[in-house]
Image: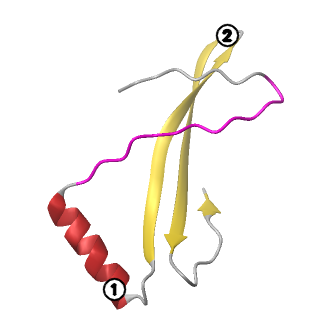
């Protein structure tokens, strides 16, 4: 699904995304989490498209997260 979200200049918003996976990938992720003291790492990658006066500008993004009881903060790239 592709849905356009408009955010005004100098504003912010929360964008909710749908995530899907395969049973085999979930099994592998669960096993890694158990082996890493209940922590799991995941990455969100995508492209934001910014409307400018000269046209649409694609801006790729990537953020890594560690989820678990002793998780450090996320890292953005």
Prevailing SS of the magenta stretch: loop
Mark 2 and mark 1: Cα distance apart in space: 49 Å
The image position of residue 43, as x and y in percent, is 45, 59
Mark 2 Cα within 10 Å, few/some/many (few <14, many 20+)? few
Residue lying farthest left? 24
Q: Residue at x 46, y 48 (%)?
A: 45
Seen in the picture, residue 29 relative to 31 is either above or below; the reply is: above
Q: Secondary structure at mark 2?
A: loop
The residue stretch that appears in magenta:
9-21
Seen in the picture, residue 17 relative to 50 is either above or below; the reply is: below
The residue singled out by tag 1 in the image is 34
Residue lying farthest front? 69
Splitting the image into 4 quarters, where does residue 10 fall?
A: top right
The total of numbered circles placed on residues is 2
The image position of residue 38, as x and y in percent, is 42, 84
The image position of residue 76, as x and y in percent, is 62, 58
Q: Is residue 77 left or right of residue 4?
A: right
Viewer-side label of 2, 1? 1
Quadrant for the C terminus, please: bottom right
Q: Residue at x 36, y 47 (%)?
A: 19
Quadrant for the N terminus, please: top left
In primary-sequence order, the first of circles 2 and 1 is: 1
- Closer to the camera in the image, 4 or 45: 4
The residue singled out by tag 2 in the image is 54
């Amino acid at each position: 699904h592709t849905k356009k979200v408009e955010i005004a200049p100098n504003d912010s918003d929360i964008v909710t995304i749908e995530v899907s996976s395969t049973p085999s990938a979930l099994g592998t992720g669960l096993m890694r989490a158990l082996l890493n003291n209940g922590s799991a790492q995941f990455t969100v990658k995508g492209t934001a498209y910014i409307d400018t006066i000269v046209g649409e500008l694609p801006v790729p993004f990537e953020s890594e997260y560690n989820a678990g009881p002793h998780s450090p903060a996320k890292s953005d790239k």
